[in-house]
Amino acid sequence: MGDFINLILSPLTIGEAWVMLAWHKVWTTIGIGGGWAWALSIVGLTVVVRIVLIPLFVKQIHSSRRMQLIQPEMQKIQAKYKGKTDPESRQAMTQETMDLYKKTGTNPFSSCLPILLQSPFFFALFTVLNNLKGIAEGTHPAIGPITPAVAHEIESSNIFGAPFSSTFMGSTDTATKIVTVVLIILMSVSTFTTQRQLMRKNLPDSALDNPFMKQQTVLLYLMPIFFALSGINFPIGVLLYWLTTNVWSMGQQFYVIRRMPAPGSAAERALHERQERKGKTVTPFSIRGLERDAAAGAAADETVQDAPNTVNRQRQQPKSKKRAKRSGPATGAAGTDDAEGSAADGKPTDQ
């Protein structure tokens, strides 16, 4: 199974190896060498990956925002069918939930997509760094441009005395353990800050007090434990990649929230205050606006569908001859038409 996964990741692994070597050449050209050149090469690789994922990141934050904003409506649907376990009620609840997703343009799986797509990049880098020792010793084949000589150079490099391929659990070196712990703490702080920023600054007050947000709050405080348990088994180079991507996410999300805050949130109020001071108007991201657009689109569809019926109603009900007689003397073009109709029937017309 492991060989199959490595085969699938092989193109990505080789591509990342080339990107690392390209960045290393840039840093050494400007005079940065040793372990810091390789450390900055990992940072550069991370930046390239995150630039590629920018469109997915924006889609993720919009999707997460929509999911959080519709929680009050979700709770109403759940309360409506609370205690009802019959198939009809369950189906109706599912249908109303799907209708809510459609009305607000919400996809519950979109928020997970960037994380899933970023995972192969993460594991590809893990594969490169985890096999450096084997490549340097000749027990593992070269990975793209990382030949035994290059692998030996990376393996012998370090930051603060900690080699890039070393792990907390696999090393007895004090420097490695200290660097690993510091990186894990920084990872935890950056992730906590990013999630708290999203939950507290960019959600309306109505969306903060519900079971969903309470679960998110619990997860927020459990993340440091997750990083501690997983980070001690990752090479320092991977931890550096992870920290860099967390810092990038934090800054990117800060920019998006500042420019496109959710309606009713503290970030939206701050945006309005900034724009008022500058004498400008603002049109922030709004799910209500999306609902209006969806409603307008549905109304347009209904108008198109009803158009033939409208035409038919306009063309029907011509005046009959009897009704023309009862309507009294006719004048103008209409009177002429009625007179001609009567003459066609062989009946004299009033002069």
Image: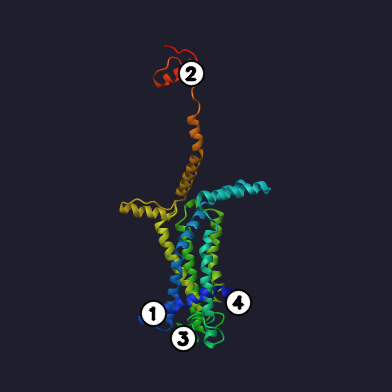
- The residue labelled by disc 4 is 3
Q: Residues within 10 Å of mark 4 (few under 14, many from 20)?
A: few
Q: Check if mark 1's residue and mark 4's residue have beta carbons within 8 Å.
A: no
Determine the residue located farthest toward the right in the rendered image: 86
For label 3, the residue is 153
- Asked whether the viewer can see residue 20, the reply is yes
Residue positioned most to the top: 351
Note whether 51 is above or below 333 in the view shown: below
Three-letter residue code for mark 4: Asp
Q: CA distance from mark 2 to mark 3?
A: 108 Å
Disc number at residue 344?
2
Camera-near label (1 vs 4) is: 4
Report the Cα–Cα distance between label 2 and label 4. 94 Å
- Tag 2: amino acid: Ala
Which residue is under mark 1?
Answer: 27
Q: Give the Cα separation between the discs numbered 4 and 3.
A: 26 Å
Mark yes or no: residue 182 visible: no
